[in-house]
Amino acid sequence: MRKIITSTILISAILCFSIPTYGGKYKKLAQTGLQYLSVETDARATAMAGAMTTVCNGSASLFANPATLALMNGMVDASFSQNSWIADIKHNMVSAAYKPLGGKFGVIGVSMISVDYGKMQGTMVWPNDQGYIDTEMFNPTALAVGVGYAKSLSAQFAIGGHLKYAGQQLGKSIIEIEDSLAVRKYKVFAPAFDFGTHFKTGWKSVAFGMSVRNFSSEIKYENEGFQLPLTFQFGVSMDLIDFVPKMSELHSLICAIDAAHPRSYPEYINVGLEYAFKDLLAIRYGYMGNRDERASNFGFGISLFGFALDYSYTPFGIFNEVQSFTLRFAL
């Protein structure tokens, strides 16, 4: 078992860091679609800049590193999030997880992300002065549903996977085919897979983790093929209060650092901090490196009687700000 764990960690590190770094601070590397899959929708994760590869986040762990789902303390966990994204786009997230018999048979979870892009005016080409005429209003949407599973293979090592079916519906248009008009709908769906590992070093609370998200085959809109936003992520975290044992009963200060290699963007570092008092009140800060318009993230959480409310706020340059709310229940 120890050899398997060591090999997995080494392979994870190689996958995340052996890929060459591309020049240019903000150079785009490849075109990807279904970008909503790379947006943080959980308020706790957003406030910590997405540095969640080694931090258990209940059932919402499915969206960061499914292996951390195995670290869930309770038997049942459910969460609902709403993210007011840029350009009035609404991201909604629902997740739930069940851990029977204390995790003897692992933890199973389900997830859903829905996106509402708002109403848009449809047009079509027309031989008039403008070159087009208005058609009906349409409402582009996106949806991803998934099921995940995680299990601790030992007291130190856990693995997890998340299989999902994701897609977008971008409305319809009227096109001309052989001197006649036809209606064509624009939608695409494809399966995708997330995989992750989590390893507790045994020295204080230091842990390492790896995740691969949005792995899928190429999909097409009409004649244009594209990949999903595949991302390799490697992280490390620790509760800094370990250095002050007398305070550990009432306080915690998690510091998490993630290094990411996305398909469509240069490598970047995310750093997240979370201070919690008696598991009642949490204050969070996150820093996102190498981004165009974002950097700092802020948030807080309140927990009581199994319920928790999380909030995050992200200044977003020319897009003003992004706010997220998450309601969570754990038993």
Image: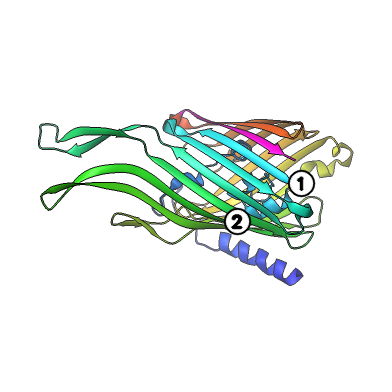
Task: Tell me, yes or no, if residue 290 can be seen here.
Answer: no
Q: Residues within 10 Å of mark 1 (few under 14, many from 20)?
A: some
- The quadrant of the image that shows the C terminus is top right
**In the rendered image, the vertical position of residue 267 relative to residue 50, given as above or below:** below
Identify the residue at image location x=64%, y=33%: 327
Q: Which residue is the site of mark 1?
A: 73
Q: Residue furthest top?
A: 320
- Report the Cα–Cα distance between label 2 and label 1: 21 Å
Identify the residue at image location x=63%, y=39%: 79
Residue 54 point in image, percent of width and height? 68, 50
> Along the horizontal axis of the image, is 24 left or right of 76?
left
Residue 102 point in image, percent of width and height? 78, 53
Q: Callout 1, which amino acid?
A: Asn
Q: Which residue is the site of mark 2?
A: 211
**In the rendered image, the vertical position of residue 160 relative to residue 62, given as above or below:** below
Nearest to N terminus: mark 2 or mark 1: 1
> In the image, which residues are magenta?
320-331
The quadrant holding residue 271 is top right
